[in-house]
Amino acid sequence: MNAIITGAMSPYYSVMYSWRAGVAEDVQSDLDVLLAPAMDFAERALNGSTSIHPFGIGLTLDDQLQMLIEDRGTEVIDGSVLVRFAEEMLVDTRQTLKSCALVLDTRLPLHETDAVEMRLEHSSGVSLTIHAPYRFAGFRKRLTFGDMIVSPGVARIWTAQV
């Protein structure tokens, strides 16, 4: 089941989450707090280079945001390998986190567009995937985002074997 998020509650979304039913309010809040910084950082990255290197954001046990970025310098690495590195960083720090987001650039073939993909996960086991379609429009190639698409996620961080 997918949900479309539209509107202007923040610069990026208003809420129409079907995933909230049966999910504790503190878990919802822990996941909500990750969305704006994930989108902000992704937007800055896209405006600077038209692509995003995968990165992670964690919400620590004391409610601090923590950026997790793999710095590979000028080394050229396949995107799927970078996603794995980012996942490994989140797994390695999960004991200090309540929730996290893995953010990457992806293609949505059915929508024929690129998207920011945010894989949100909570230590309680709740996970979801949010896609924020984007395009560069106009003469100045201005970045614009479409409606977000929310779907159930696959838990990877707290289920990974260490």
Image (cartoon, rainbow, N blue to C red):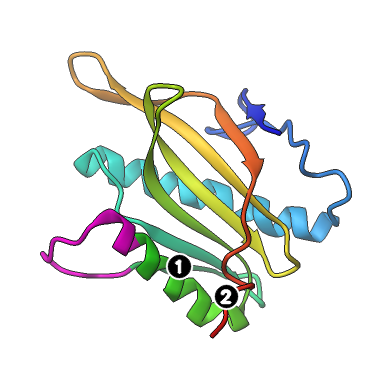
Farthest left residue? 74
Which residue is disc 1 drawn over? 87
Callout 2 amino acid: Ala
Q: Position of residue 114 (x, y in %)?
A: 36, 32
**Quadrant where the C terminus lies?**
bottom right
**Which residue is found at the position 62% from the left and 55% from the top?**
154
Foreground of the two, 80 or 14: 80
User: Where on the picture, by quarter, is residue 9?
Assistant: top right
Question: Is 127 one of the magenta-colored residues?
Answer: no
Q: Is residue 74 magenta?
A: yes
Residue at 69 percent of width and 70 percent of height: 123
User: Toward which corner of the image does residue 130 lie, by quadrant?
Assistant: top right
SS assignment at label 2: loop
Relative to 60, is 77 on the left or the right?
Answer: left
For marks 1 and 2, the one nearer the N-term is 1
162, above or below 155, in the image: below
Q: Nearer the viewer, residue 108 or 68?
A: 108
Residue on which disc 2 sits: 160
Task: Identify the image quadrant of the N terminus.
Answer: top right
Residue at (35%, 67%) from the top-left corner?
69
Residue 118 placement (x, y as % from top left): 51, 48
> Foreground residue, 64 or 154?
154
Q: In this picture, which residue range is highlighted in magenta? A: 70-82
